[in-house]
Image: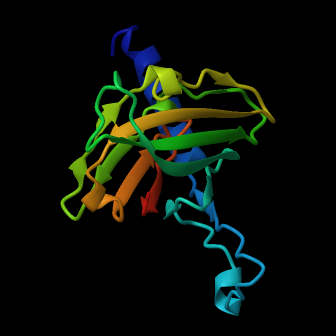
Amino acid sequence: MSKFAWPALAASAVLALSLTACGGANTVTPAAPAASEAAPAAAETPAASKLSGTFADTITFPSGVAVTVKPAVVTAAQYAAGAVEGNIVTFDISVTNGSKESVNGALMSFPKVSYGAQGTKAQTATDIQAGIGAASFSEILPGETSTVKVGYGIPSASYGDVRVEITAPNMMDKPAIFKGAVG
């Protein structure tokens, strides 16, 4: 074996070990029921290994980074781009860094959004005047929370069946998936 093959082989082994050692399951913290709603006893135990939840939930990655997604439907301004039927579906994505390391949240700013039974990909929409789609996450320090507002064009007939997939803060974790109605 050549002297150049040993470093590559060693690096591959270290990468393989780190990928198997760091993998874990995302956790979902269900939204607290309203004071007037009584939750059944079985629902009080959160699912520890779920990757997905509803728009009312908080999903926490194994690293301790938590993400929430809050949808809204807004009327698009005159010069907005990507609106459907005069509306933009916005998603406030909040990331709380509960880990001990800083997180580069850039990829978490660009979710995959789909709608309907066929999983049609939603197109991005921007409205600079309303601050929709003009920002992205940067470095999020331990203990900090950062929020961005993104927008997508979704037909109103599909508001009841929307899926938002947020990229994990690192390459080892699976994405967080939020599903439900937006309007």
Quarter of the image where the C terminus is located:
bottom left
Give the answer, above or below, for where 74 lies relative to 180: above
Kindly indicate the quadrant of the structure image that contains residue 65: top right
Kindly indicate the quadrant of the structure image that contains residue 118: bottom left
| Whole-percent x, y for residue 93 in the image | 56, 41
Would residue 89 appear left or right of 138 to someone viewing this image?
Answer: left
| Whole-percent x, y for residue 107 in the image | 47, 29
Most extreme residue toward the top is: 3
- Residue drawn at the location 57% of the way across and 32% of the way down: 148
Give the answer, above or below, for where 177 lies relative to 82: below
| Whole-percent x, y for residue 48 in the image | 63, 68
| Whole-percent x, y for residue 37 in the image | 70, 85
Would residue 61 appear left or right of 77 to someone viewing this image?
Answer: right
- Residue drawn at the location 35% of the way across and 32% of the way down: 125
- Residue drawn at the location 56% of the way across and 41% of the way down: 92
Would residue 27 appear left or right of 11 to someone viewing this image?
Answer: right
Quarter of the image where the N terminus is located:
top left
Closer to us: 158 or 118: 158
Kindly indicate the quadrant of the structure image that contains residue 151: top left
Most extreme residue toward the front is: 78
Give the answer, above or below, for where 64 lies relative to 12: below
Closer to us: 148 or 174: 148
Colouring rule applied to residues: rainbow
- Residue drawn at the location 42% of the way across and 24% of the way down: 9
